Image: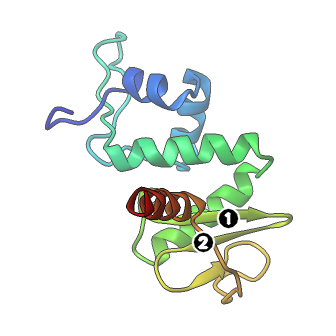
Amino acid sequence: MSVEGYLSATAKHVTGITERQLTYWTMTGLIVPSVASGARGRQGGQEKRRWSFSDLVGMKTISDLRRAGVSLQALRKVGKLIASYGHTFADTYIVASGDDVLISTGEQMVSALRQPGQLALAVVYDLGRCAREVRTALKKAA
């Protein structure tokens, strides 16, 4: 990444979103470029929007959750709640569960939709970590 951030063309390529999605999400404030904002110049000049790595993770997360059936309205609420905790999509665990989305930014998990901010009892088990531990134990046992 350059110091100036990523151009929208790169953002679209790595996140798999369309120009239309990016334009709409930016216009409605769902995702905002954190490095530099601004669209093309009046005569269609060079694009000025620049996106950070965290912005790209946010775009990809929103895209994946949309494909999973989470509405844009719900994602706006999720984004606002995440921001209220001082976090971004890039440093938050998100669990879509039926008609709710749970977020975890550390020790606790909270509801983002049904009862925003309400603590939720949930256990998120990292199967990848478990598999790595089993592989390591098998190598040591061999």
Q: Give the Cα distance between marks 1 and 2.
A: 6 Å
For this orientation, the residue located farthest to the front is 142
Q: Position of residue 67 (x, y in %)?
A: 74, 40
**At which x and y percent is residue 23?**
54, 31
Q: What residue is drawn where x is 55% and y is 67%? A: 80
Res. 75 image quadrant: bottom right
Rendered image: mark on residue 95: 1
Q: Secondary structure at mark 1?
A: strand
Task: Name the secondary structure under disc 2.
Answer: strand
Above or below for 77 versus 60? below
Judge whether 5 appears above or below 131 on screen.
above
Determine contact: label 1, label 2, CB under 8 Å.
yes
Q: Is 17 situated left or right of 69 in this image?
A: left
Q: Which mark is residue 4?
A: none
The residue under the point 45% across, 46% down is 57
Above or below — where is 77 with respect to 28?
below
